[in-house]
Amino acid sequence: MPAHHRARFARRVTISGAAALTAVLAVAGPAAAHAEVEADTPQALAENVTLSFVSEAESAKAGFAELRVVLPEGIAPTDVTLGKSPKGWKLKATDDGYTLGGPALKAGVDAEYSIKVRQLPDAKEIAFKTVETYSDGEVSRWIELPRDGAESEQPAPLLKLKAAAPGATPVGADPTASEEPSPSASAAAPTTPAATAANAGKAADEDDGSSTGVVVGGVVVALLVLGGGAWWLVKRRSPATGN
């Protein structure tokens, strides 16, 4: 191949390669997540797993003040404990997840923290929808889930899990979530309408019995009094009749 042909071919390869690289970057750009999650044991039904989260700062004038996370199905708020977090930040459980916040971070500083989960659910992937609030009130929502393979503009942090280990089973509900009734409470019989009616009937029977006893006793006493009086009158009139 002549030299000028080789040079032209090299230019075409360079231009084609640059165009292909630009296209790849253009496609990959939107997929870059601004909220991410990783696990030290990314496996279904794994226990005592540490999850690490990163929320990338986007505001140039305000810093993160709070993060709100919706937990995936299979992880209860009571199964989560806080690990590392920004200084002064506190974790509070909500009905469907938790909030983590405190003194606002400096503008441009990413929010990084970790939590420990009692057990991961039996799933192929789990999402942690995250709502970020900045100190100036700006809110950024990373809550979108992948649909039909399409990439989301604001995807929720997604964690892919390996299949559960052989023999792994769900550990069940947290025993501290519900308390056993006290012995005294268990021993106390509940007051029900049936029990109340039975007690009332028994009391009525007892009252009737006592009332009947009083009446009978009164009649006996009256008869004795009347009998004694009649005997005295007969006794008194007998001498008078004889005279």
Image (spheres, grey):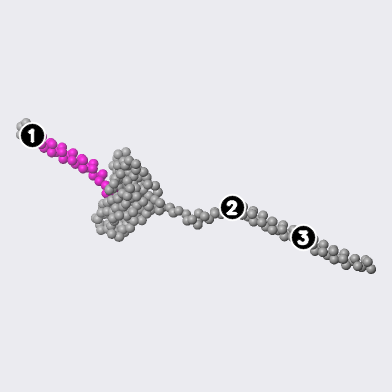
Which label sits in the foreground, 1 or 2? Answer: 2
Which label sits in the foreground, 2 or 3? Answer: 3
Could you tell me which quadrant the N terminus lies in? top left
Q: Is residue 132 visible?
A: no
Q: Earlier in the sequence, mark 3 or mark 1?
A: 1
Helix, strand or loop at mark 3: helix
Residue at x 72%, y 57% (from the top left corner):
212
Which region is colored magenta? 8-37
Helix, strand or loop at mark 1: helix
Residue at label 3? 220
Residue at x 61%, y 54% (from the top left corner):
199
> Which x, y percent locates residue 74?
37, 46
Helix, strand or loop at mark 2: helix
How many labels, in total? 3
Which label sits in the foreground, 3 or 1? Answer: 3
Q: What mark, if any, has residue 6 been given in the picture?
A: 1
Q: Which residue type does callout 1 highlight?
A: Arg
Q: Quote the CA–CA distance across marks 2 and 3.
A: 38 Å
- Which secondary structure class fits the magenta region best? helix
* Location of residue 106 with respect to 125 vertically, above or below: below
Q: Quote the CA–CA distance across marks 1 and 2.
A: 104 Å
Q: Which residue type does callout 3 highlight?
A: Val
**Closer to us: 113 or 217:** 217
Q: Which residue type does callout 2 highlight?
A: Ala
- Left or right side of 231 for 89: left
Residue at x 25%, y 46% (from the top left corner):
32
